[in-house]
Image (cartoon, helix red, strand yellow):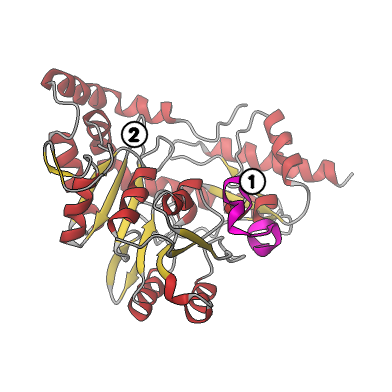
Amino acid sequence: MKVPLFDMTRQYEKLRKEILKNLDAVFASGRVILGDNVKMLEENVQKYLITKHAIGVASGSDALLIAVKALNFEKGDYIITTPYTFFATASSITRNGLKPLFVDITEKDYDIDLGKVEDILQNHPEKEKIKGFIPVHLFGKSMDLKRLKQIKEKYGIKIIEDNAQSIGAREQIDGKEVYAGTVGDVGTISFFPTKNLGGYGDGGMIITDNDDLAARMRKLRVHGAAKKYHHDEVGFNSRLDEVQAAILKIKLKELEKYIEKRIKKAENYAELFKKHNLEDKIKYPEAKTDKSHVYHQYVVELKKGNRDRLKDFLKEKGIGTSIYYPVGLHSQECFKELGYSEDDFPVTQHATKTTLALPIFPELKKKEQEYVVENIKKYFEEEEK
């Protein structure tokens, strides 16, 4: 049996007719950039996430880059973020002339440690230069939104929520449903094909409740021009195209169903790990049904054994896996001038060596999950011989 880490073709089979119909309408219209489909998608995302503004851009990376620029930090300011995330989180800081200030993650769920964030905000020798914070809702799990809101209010720090991986994750705050990405000043979304809401190419979106920020970011995505050929500042060429928007507006209608299916896959994995007595060998995500985790990735951690050997073993059995992330951002060659050593973030270092993403997507079959876990058990059996 072959089990892919991710397979978008199964989803396409179910949506093919509607997608092709929408694409034909796009091509027949002759409008392929920032047209009615982009506008409709923006409006639908606003309603779904309960936010005032949604701005379609060319990628999740551009969403971060534009969001950071729009907040008017001064060159050399520090922006707090995690070293355990995709490269674009930190590059959006440095590309704007700012300095990443990395903070280690928690052992429980790999989120940035908010206790350590507060400690730095209170005690860093240059705390007056710390002006921003980019938390990451990692692997589909919403961070502690209530505490994030408290940090924003207590310290007056600008927050850009990197929500590339966790659209639809939410929690209850004071009796209201609040979505990841909507607590900070700005939230960013990626529509990369593997995401829970993924297109058939690059795409992204920025969300905010701030009218002035929204107006500026709409300008920044079109070279800083509110009016064609009249540029208030130097911006970017970062427009969401109609093709991606026409596809994404179809998938957005299905997103809640996709989330429910992903949660079910997480529950299946948890049951299978228990069934095969792997709890002392594998740390796996808690199966949550409250949609605070939408399981973009299903990342496990080896308590025993060698992660890389397990990955190779599963590959031989036809099972797709991936490592998120093999190198912490503090150890990247391009950031060495920041002066961090590999040992500065021990929890991150441990995660880079012990974690592995297993197959998860809405159309994954239970028998495929059973095959994955059975082979994980076989790996440990062979290791113990």
Nearer to the camera, 69 or 218: 69
Nearer to the camera, 169 or 131: 131
Nearer to the camera, 244 or 97: 97
- Residue 199 image label: 2
- At 62% from the left edge and 46% from the top edge, which residue is drawn? 333
- Residue range highlighted in magenta: 331-350
Left or right for 355, reference 285: right
Q: Is residue 334 magenta?
A: yes
Asked if labels 1 and 2 touch by Cβ distance under 8 angstroms, the answer is no
The type of residue carrying mark 2 is: Gly
Relative image position of residue 142 (x, y in whole percent): 42, 61
Give the structural element (helix, strand or loop) at label 1. loop
Relative image position of residue 253 (x, y in whole percent): 25, 42
Q: Residues within 10 Å of mark 2 (few under 14, many from 20)?
A: many
The type of residue carrying mark 1 is: Pro
Relative image position of residue 236 (x, y in whole percent): 28, 41
Q: Is residue 349 above or below residue 228?
A: below
Whether residue 170 appears in this view of the structure is no
To which quarter of the image does residue 135 belong? bottom left
- Residue 156 image label: none
Relative image position of residue 344 (x, y in whole percent): 66, 64
Give the structural element (helix, strand or loop) at label 2. loop
Left or right for 362, reference 347: left
According to the image, label 1 marks what residue? 326
